[in-house]
Amino acid sequence: MLRTAACLIAATIAPAHAAPHDTAAGLAPSFRMSGDVSAELSYVVNSSDTALVPGSYETTYLSGMRMSSLTGVLRLNGTYQKLDAEVSVVGAQLIMPPDPTRSTQRRNKYSFNRLLTAYGAYSFGDADAPQARLSIGYFPFSYSGQTRSLGSYLFRSGTYPGYVFSGDSTAYLAGLHFETSLPGILRHDLFLTTEVEWDPQYDVSLSYLARIGVDKPFEFDAGVFFDRLVPVYSFKTSPEELPHLNGTIIEAGGEGDTVYYTKQGVRLMGRFRADLKHFFTSERFSPQDLVVYTEAALLGVKNYPGFYDDVTERVPAMIGFNIPTARILDVLSVELEYYGSPWRNDPSHARPKPYENYAYETITYASEGTGWRGTRNDYKWHVYAQRTLLTHITVSARVASDHLRGLTSDGSIYPYERLHGYDEWYWSIGARVSF
Amino acid sequence: MRICQLPEVMTTTMMTANMRSVLCLCATILGATAAAGRAEVSFKPHVEVYHSVLRIEESNEASQIEFMNRTGDVSYYSDNSGAVIQSLGGRLGLSARFGARLSATFTYDNHIWHVFQGRDMPVYDNTEKIAGGVHEGYLKVALGPMPAAPVVLRLGYFNMRYAPEVMNLGEYLFRTGVYPGYVLSGGEGIELLGAHVQTTIVPHLTQDLLFTSEINIFPAYDYSLSYLARVDILNIAEIGAGAMLYRVVSVREENTYNALSYVGDGADTTRIPLSGNKLMGRLVIDPKPLFNPGRMGPEDLKLYCEAALLGTKDYPEMYEDIRERVPVMAGVHVPMFNLLDVLAVEVEWYGTPHGCNPENSATAVPLVQEQFRYGDRDDWKWAVTATREIVDGFEVTARAARDHLRMEDGNGWYQPRELMKLPGDWYWSVRSSIRF
């Protein structure tokens, strides 16, 4: 044993040659690390959000409420031959409004870290200029980079009842994404995705997006989304619940023909973007100035008697414009939205029958004044300004009456909206450092 | 802390020899560190993304699955046959090399997973869960002549897999408990916290010595000592054996020797500790060197078996029959001639009459509802696993099995209850991963 130990010591202290690294050109993976840190402070000026604490019916608890967030994102990209992979995680410390079902006084302080993206992609053809690309995993996707809050309906919405979101235009999807340009001016995106966030989960959806003129002065987009085309739990996606009207079972398909409501549906989307600088030439315009964009969607092409018999109630539409600021700001955008749904805008409502409540439309026991909130919240607006101070530092400000929700303790989206009318609004300021 | 009784003949000699060995080891580590300090530092990131979907085709055990709804109330599913579980996530990590001998590895994992959705589950409940944490973090020191150092030391939180041919059932030494003897399954080994020394000083003989801390099952932190050895015979066969002194060092005696952990009464009371000794033996045969394998893949035609004894000591009432503490498995890699990388068929027999609950309320006596619960109905397990690397770095694994399937708990461990207990229970899963 002593001889063995002596040999080990001698061998260890003696000069050792480093193990050769695999430096053959093109064989070793390459990596890139990036991320950002951001802080945001928000103030709710006016909100009629109703507390649901037993014994309380307070509608002013949110007015004057401050919220804040400190967020960090770390991202690692790797490339190996024709494979790319990305993993990013987000960590944050938040101060969010109270949960109105539990308290009206105590703001919630959360810390969380969670997966932001985890996907791989394979490039067909030349890796530097691929003819097509297939991604698999949990990946971000945005087709409307100009959107600051309102829009991006194709992936940020649901059907029966229809719900929409506001905020960053990026949607996070789980599944497969195939993209190609054929011919060169027409870009195709095909998705096979699985629902991971909102009940009922795992249902598989198929969607297609066609875009003409990406990165050109004029862009036209059209898309179709077959929502929950393949349900995993059919008893949850189509629960065979019969609607009731004044205590009487109504038959959705007409006399003697019962059709059950379902969360399956087809969404359509159309979008147009125009960069009006194409008609003007001036050095006083920043790249984002004079861009106008508009989008509309149909959240469920099929009518159902009772709750979904008016197609106009399922059409959110928005328009946005970037106001020129003579390069004082990178962007000053104004967005407006109209969405005439009489139902609560709630992604967590897992049944195809809408949530019926005096504040929203009901058909079961309608009375005078029913649905007042469903009418007041049809219009949304958003004003956003951003300025880059140094190469990696940006500051921003917004004033808005949008679909503000907030986050929960694990970083997922709080399902209930906080603002219920065009005169209910908030402001926020933020800063971001990217590396 | 209490060190459980070792045979006296071993004690004095071992202590003296161990002191010298420890001093030698410290000297070599210091030497390696000093050498590393003079060397160049290099970093190598690594990334992995994965997605898995699992469907339970039949489970008689699912009625006992708990779930927590949004208001914090606990309910039970009545029927989970046909249940689907999905998980997707990513790992990012960094390996740092300080010269030729010293390296450090850290990997962080975060993933989205779900609990069961059942017919009786309130529809407003969100079953999406987020889990994240350290997947591995350890220091590695290579000792002896380079480049193939005969001694390698790992310190920290690391993956241990001593039977790479095992695709699901087996690797009992570290994936089991004693009193009661639970068994885990799965194809990725297990993460251990502690120290691991591996040596190949003797040609064809690989020896592993581990000193690990229990971090998953209460009582936590008790230390265990393990030894494994495997002999390679002409690249045709491998014989392995191992022993584990589980919880040989107790951090809190009142937890390891739980006052409620006894059988009998009065003068016939017998206390059963949570500590115990495990033995393991395994055999792998790869006959391909005996003939021209043609287009067979490197994993084809391997035959392997493993058996373990989960607790060498009998205790009255609950652990009287030693045969009831012996899981045995056998497996074969069906030749696929490179159509698949591996197609493994594995079977296991484990004759314990009790339920395999790792938590068991931290006592060595099985809970009342776990005692003699299934008889011999749950003795047999099986698994068929297929893997294929589609392109470099992208692998797909498919499995059909009735094994020791447990759902994760979101904290890096498992929920206690097995879901595949009775004949007729089975599930399938598909996992894809990109890793480089």
Image (cartoon, rainbow, N blue to C red):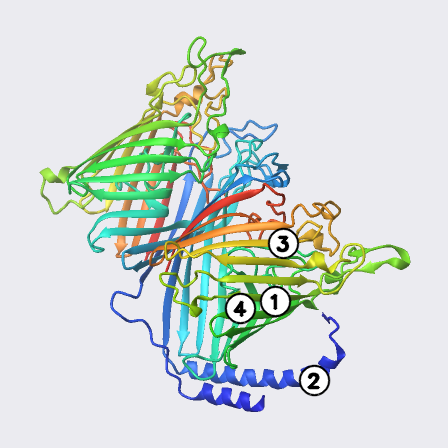
Q: Vertical placement of B326 versus B201: above or below?
A: above
Q: Chain of mark 4?
A: B
Q: Circle 1 is placed at which residue position? A: B281
Whether residue B259 appears in this view of the structure is yes
Q: Amino acid at mark 3?
A: Trp
Q: Chain of mark 3?
A: B
Q: Position of residue B43 (x, y in %)?
A: 37, 70
Q: Report the mark closest to the observer, 3 or 4.
A: 3
Q: Circle 3 is placed at which residue position? A: B349
Pointer 1 or 2: first along the chain: 2
Q: Report helix, strand or loop for mark 4.
A: strand
Q: Report helix, strand or loop for mark 2.
A: helix
Determine the residue positioned at 55% across, 41% down. Answer: A106
Hey, which residue is sitting farthest front in the picture? B291
Q: Within 10 angstroms of label 2, few (less than 14), some, or many (20 or more) residues?
A: few
Q: Circle 4 is placed at which residue position? A: B156
Q: CA distance from mark 1 to mark 3?
A: 15 Å
Q: Within 10 angstroms of label 1, few (less than 14), some, or many (20 or more) residues?
A: many
Q: Amino acid at mark 2?
A: Thr
Pointer 4 or 1: first along the chain: 4
Pointer 3 or 2: first along the chain: 2
